[in-house]
Image (cartoon, helix red, strand yellow):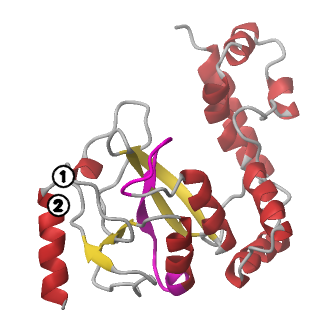
Amino acid sequence: MADTVRRQSTRLLQQTSTPVPTGIKKASITSSRAPKTAKASAITRPATKKLAQKAPKGAATISPVTQEQLLLTDASAFRAWLDDNENTSDGVWLVLAKKGTTSPTSLTRTQALDEALCSGWIDSQGKSLDAFTSIQRYTPRRAKSLWSAINVGHVARLREEGRMRERGEREVTRAKEDGRWERAYAGPSNMTIPDEVVAALRGKPVAKKRLDGMKNMERYSALLPIVTTHTEATRKRKIDKLVEELSKER
């Protein structure tokens, strides 16, 4: 049976123009320990070399795939996989559907994030694969993993819908106990300039003008290290460094 599945996988990968049949799951496992299989059939898929290529300047660094890569048919298939593997897997590269795509998968990033949060997992770096799909990294949330205000809101909704799993609730409890829940940071469109930064910019017209002139994502990237730091000394050091960089002649 295993030999038959591998032969089917090889044929599918050679015929790249042929959509993957509905109901098929792909999982590429390059780690020494394979996870439990999800509740539908699975075939192997080698890790793509694209993910090891150097990212463009300014983009997030994409590490080579070293763990299982999953191509699942839909959100319910990812839910089934998490139910079986959320406590044993170190993370997956998940293939996601771009807008309008239904084959080889209809699983969207929004759907995948919901399921991940329910199980105490979180998304991270991602990359486009082709015109129809992208790939995103999902891992169990680490002990000191920061929470965004957006995800705090998602959890409230998922609770109302009765979808939160035990593992997901444990991660929420841990975050509330150690203060990470209260320190949840805003997203790019909602992040405000902290009062300490405003004070540090007084008398620094060049630095203030540059920060005010940044686009949302650029300002977000500049302020996030400050917003997510809760020790006063480290926070002040990061603010001083930001003001210094903004004040430099360009």
Q: Is disc 2 placed on a helix, strand or loop?
A: helix
List x then y, in percent, for residue 128: 38, 43
Query: Who is closer to the viewer here, 78 or 1?
Result: 1
Which amino acid type is marked by label 2? Leu
Q: Check the image and name the residue furthest to the front.
A: 22
Q: Is residue 204 above or below residue 117?
A: above
List x then y, in percent, for residue 173: 81, 76
Which amino acid type is marked by label 1? Thr
List x then y, in percent, for residue 104: 36, 57
- Can residue 241 be seen by looking at this rendering? no
**Crowd band around label 1 with a 10 angstrom C-alpha radius: few (<14), some (14–19), many (20+):** few
Residue under the point 50% across and 58% down: 107
Q: Are marks 2 and 1 in contact (CB under 8 Å)?
A: yes
- Can residue 95 be seen by looking at this rendering? yes
Q: Is residue 108 magenta?
A: no
Query: Who is closer to the viewer here, 243 or 128?
Result: 128
Span shown in magenta: 84-104
- Name the side, left or right, on which 31 lies relative to 197: left
Q: Is disc 1 placed on a helix, strand or loop?
A: loop
Q: How many marks?
A: 2
Distance in Å between CA atoms under marks 2 and 1: 6 Å
Quadrant in which residue 10 is drawn:
bottom left
- Name the side, left or right, on which 33 lies relative to 38: left
**Crowd band around label 2 with a 10 angstrom C-alpha radius: few (<14), some (14–19), many (20+):** some
Residue under the point 76% across and 8% down: 205
List x then y, in percent, for residue 225: 65, 43
Q: Which residue is mark 2?
A: 13
Q: Check the image and name the residue furthest to the bottom.
A: 1
Q: Which residue is mark 1?
A: 16
Residue under the point 72% across and 84% down: 166
Q: Is residue 15 above or below residue 11?
A: above
